[in-house]
Image (tube, rainbow, N blue to C red):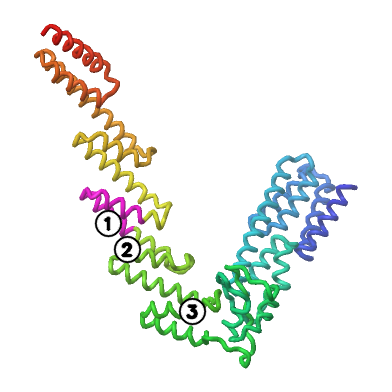
């Protein structure tokens, strides 16, 4: 009886999410199950587990991304098979996925709303409700906040007051009450710096805006066609000062910076080009590819400098790439390869201390860094042995001072050289005895 009640409850939930068609499909399944449970007895008949059919349906709907329906069938499967440990895990996974996707689409909707792209925002909020029908924030946006009224969006500057803003937009500080009303603020309190305020656009007879935004947008567009990017930028910046979220102005601004980046890239001014591209919104078509192309050209330049052994210039170029793209592995690899090459050159010149100083600046996880550091110590020990043997020759020739100097050099290169330590002490003791004899 309890199991039957659970199925009726799930039937009611299915009606809410899928309508009559879903209920008919469910009832058809139940009828089939009843017929399967009490079929005409024949020798070929086999018994089918009731839960398996619903589990299959749940997985089928999950593949179609109809997650609420998938959850519904998964719950039926769980009701019919209460001893299963996997079904509760799957139910929990579906719930988690539903919540994640709902949050994802809701966030997109909010971003579209901030950009005044209400049609796109509405679609995202509706998708949110498809995953989570009781999502309060999405419902609030759909019912109360997707406003089609005309507003300009102003980003509050430091020390701005509502009267200052009212004077800026309406040439009349006494209209500050309008701004306060539409933004749920108290007229006497200053707005917080960085806040985006909605400035209502009044009827034309009440508006005395310092710029005519539609006309200025046309001017900026024409300037871009003429490739006068800086002049176009001046206009878009001015528009965005009054209407911070103006999409057309933002698009023109992006286009201006993009064109300037392309021009600088053509002049082989790659760092300057990247600076321009970085000022473009990352979603702007082609900008990611343009940045990557410029970075690739810079990497080629750095590799050429490495072949010429201009190490400091390699570090400068690769370092700038990492300033723009901290995760650029090619630039990081190039820096560490340069450290290794510089270290090897210093080993050849027997400048072991400087070689180690250079290699200690590199990433110790790189194989070439580990090997080159090992090569430094091998070379030091080998050179220490040369000085030790030279010291032995001087000692045999009774040139005690020269022997001590050679052994001291050996010890400086290899502080663990026991024979050098011992021989220095013996030679100094012998010198003392010779001085006493004299």
Label 2: few (<14), some (14–19) or many (≥20) C-alpha neighbours in 10 Å: many
Q: CA distance from mark 1 to mark 3?
A: 39 Å
User: Which element type, helix, strand or loop, lies under badge 1?
Assistant: helix
Which numbered tag is attached to residue 332?
none
293 on left or right of 10: left
**Relative to 219, residue 255 above or below:** above
Task: Report crowding for label 3: few under 14, some 14 to 19, many 20 or more residues within 10 A (C-alpha).
Answer: some
Which element type, helix, strand or loop, lies under badge 3?
helix
- Where's residue 105, x and y in %? 63, 63
Q: What separation in Å lies between label 2 and label 3 (alpha carbons)?
A: 28 Å
Quarter-of-image position of residue 353: top left
Q: Residue 238, which numbered label? A: 3
| Residue range corresponding to the magenta coloring | 296-320
Determine which residue is flagged by label 1: 301
Magenta stretch, main secondary structure, is helix
Residue 408 position within the rendered picture, expressed as x and y whole percent measured from the top left: 21, 22
Look at discs 1 and 3 and give the one toward the viewer: 3
Mark carried by residue 270: 2
Q: Position of residue 326 (x, y in %)?
A: 42, 53
Residue furthest to the bottom:
205
Nearer the observer, 292 or 272: 272
Q: Is residue 52 magenta?
A: no
> Mark 2 or mark 1, which is nearer the start of the sequence?
2
Secondary structure under the numbered disc 2 in the rendered image: helix
Q: Judge from the rendering whether residue 404 lies leftward or rightward of residue 144; answer left or right.
A: left
Marks 1 and 2 in Cβ contact (< 8 Å): yes
Determine the residue located farthest toward the top in the rendered image. 437
Q: Answer with mark 1 or mark 3, whichever residue precedes in sequence.
A: 3
Kindly identify the residue that appears in the image at 43 percent across and 78 percent down: 234
- Compared with 366, 240 (above or below) is below
């Amino acid at each position: 009886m309890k199991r039957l009640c659970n199925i009726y409850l799930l039937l009611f939930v299915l009606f809410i999410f899928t309508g009559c068609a879903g209920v008919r499909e469910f009832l058809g399944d139940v009828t089939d199950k009843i017929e399967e449970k009490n079929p005409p007895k024949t020798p070929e008949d086999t018994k089918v587990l009731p839960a398996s059919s619903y589990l299959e349906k749940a997985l089928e709907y999950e593949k179609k991304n109809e997650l609420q329906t998938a959850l519904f069938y998964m719950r039926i499967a769980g009701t019919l098979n209460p001893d299963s440990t996997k079904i509760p895990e799957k139910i929990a996974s579906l719930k988690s996925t539903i919540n994640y996707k709902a949050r994802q689409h809701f966030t997109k909707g909010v971003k579209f709303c901030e950009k005044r792209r209400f049609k796109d925002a509405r679609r995202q909020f509706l998708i949110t409700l498809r995953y989570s029908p009781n999502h309060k924030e999405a419902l609030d946006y759909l019912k109360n906040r997707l406003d089609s009224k005309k507003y300009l969006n102003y980003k509050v500057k430091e020390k701005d007051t509502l009267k200052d803003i009212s004077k800026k937009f309406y040439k009349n500080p006494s209209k500050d009450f309008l701004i306060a009303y539409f933004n749920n603020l108290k007229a006497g309190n200053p707005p917080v710096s960085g806040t985006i305020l909605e400035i209502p656009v009044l009827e034309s007879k009440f508006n005395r805006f310092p710029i005519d935004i539609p006309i200025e947008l046309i001017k900026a567009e024409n300037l871009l066609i003429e490739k006068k990017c800086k002049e176009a930028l001046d206009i878009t910046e001015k528009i965005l000062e009054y209407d911070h979220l103006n999409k057309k102005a933002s698009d023109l601004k992006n286009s201006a910076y993009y064109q300037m980046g392309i021009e600088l890239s053509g002049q082989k001014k790659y760092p300057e080009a990247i600076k321009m591209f970085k000022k473009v919104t990352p979603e702007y078509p082609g900008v990611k590819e343009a940045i990557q192309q410029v970075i690739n050209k810079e990497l080629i330049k750095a590799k050429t400098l490495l072949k010429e052994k201009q190490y400091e210039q390699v570090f400068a170029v690769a370092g700038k790439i990492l300033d723009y793209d901290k995760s650029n592995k090619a630039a990081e690899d190039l820096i560490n390869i340069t450290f290794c090459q510089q270290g090897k050159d210093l080993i050849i010149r027997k400048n072991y201390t400087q070689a180690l100083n250079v290699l200690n600046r590199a990433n110790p996880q790189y194989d070439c860094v580990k090997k080159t550091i090992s090569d430094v110590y091998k070379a030091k020990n080998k050179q220490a042995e040369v000085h030790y043997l030279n010291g032995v020759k001087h000692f045999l020739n009774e040139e005690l001072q020269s022997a001590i100097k050679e052994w001291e050099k050996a010890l400086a290169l290899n502080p663990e050289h026991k024979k050098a330590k011992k021989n220095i002490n013996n030679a100094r003791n012998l010198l003392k005895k010779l001085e006493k004899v004299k």
